[in-house]
Amino acid sequence: MIFYIVIVLDELPEFKRNVLEALRQPLEEGTITITRSLVTASFPANFMLIAAMNPCPCGYFGDRIHNCHCTPQQIRQYQAKISGPLLDRIDLHIEVPSVQYRALSGKDAGEPSCRIKERVDKARARQRKRYEGNSVFCNARMTEKQIKNYCSIDEESHKLLEMAVEKLGLSARAINRVQKVSRTIADLEGNEKIESVHVAEAIQYRTLDRGLI
């Protein structure tokens, strides 16, 4: 039984297609349904998915130092191993560039982990209070009706979402994910109101929806 754990899948395109597609239901509903001999059983499957993949077969597409040796067709075929419906169900797509030695050896430690944890704890507390008495406990588990109730946005934000659909081809499910992430970004900043900057940032986390090539 899978219940509130973290699943890490490295080299995501190397997994069999049917294995990846089996993730769609638990990512969407938090349950997994098994049917055997006309008997159907559902089990809780609440988990956080963390997946990693190269941008192309050789791994150097878009790299600032190394040359990519893949053809455009090879890159498209490689990226197409991850279906659109599965990508729709992944909240954050982040492109991570290679780290240079200067950055590794530098003294700039960035924001301390303890400070990040403090912001996350406050955001989670805000969400627990918001959904008290509801069937969900965090933004990620909001239903479509709850998104309408708790993710109210202004006209400028609506225009950003419209542009994302028209220019980037985002699906209705991906837009729901954008709204949930926008709600979380606002919570991390301590804002009850979702602003256009939060929506714009959330859209930026849909890298794979618009393709890398």
Image: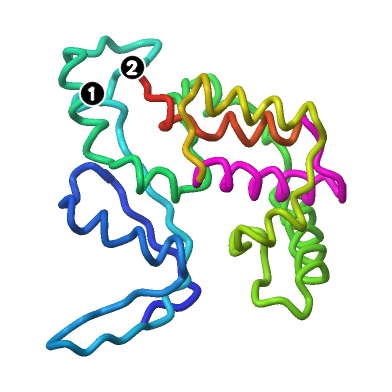
What amino acid is at disc 1? Arg
Q: Quadrant of residue 62?
A: top left
**Quadrant placement of the C terminus:** top left
Q: CA distance from mark 1 to mark 2?
A: 7 Å
Q: Mark 1 — residue?
A: 76
Q: Is residue 52 above or below residue 33?
A: above
Question: Magenta span has 67?
Answer: no
SS class, disc 1: helix
> Of the residues shown, which amino acid type is indicated by label 2?
Ile
Q: Which secondary structure type mostly characterizes the magenta part of the structure?
A: helix
> In the figure, is residue 174 to the left or right of 137?
left
Residue at point 60% right, 22% down?
Answer: 163
- Vertical placement of residue 13 versus 143, above or below: above
The image's mark for residue 213 is 2
* Image spot of residue 71 (x, y percent): 17, 13
Would residue 196 be found to the left or right of residue 17 on screen? right
Is residue 177 found left or right of 69 in the rendered image? right
- Count all numbered tags in the image, as a single digit: 2
Query: Looking at the image, do the residues carrying marks 1 and 2 touch, with CB atoms under 8 Å apart?
Result: yes
Q: Earlier in the sequence, mark 1 or mark 2?
A: 1
Question: What segment carries the magenta color?
Answer: 173-196
Residue, x 76% and y 62% (percent of image)? Answer: 121
Residue 208 picture location, percent across and down: 41, 31
Q: Nearer the viewer, residue 39 or 12?
A: 39
Judge the density around disc 2: few (<14), some (14-19), many (≥20) Cα neighbours within 10 Å: few
Q: The N terminus appears in which quarter of the rendering?
A: bottom left
Please state the horizontal and vertical placement of residue 98, each as a whole percent of the image: 42, 24
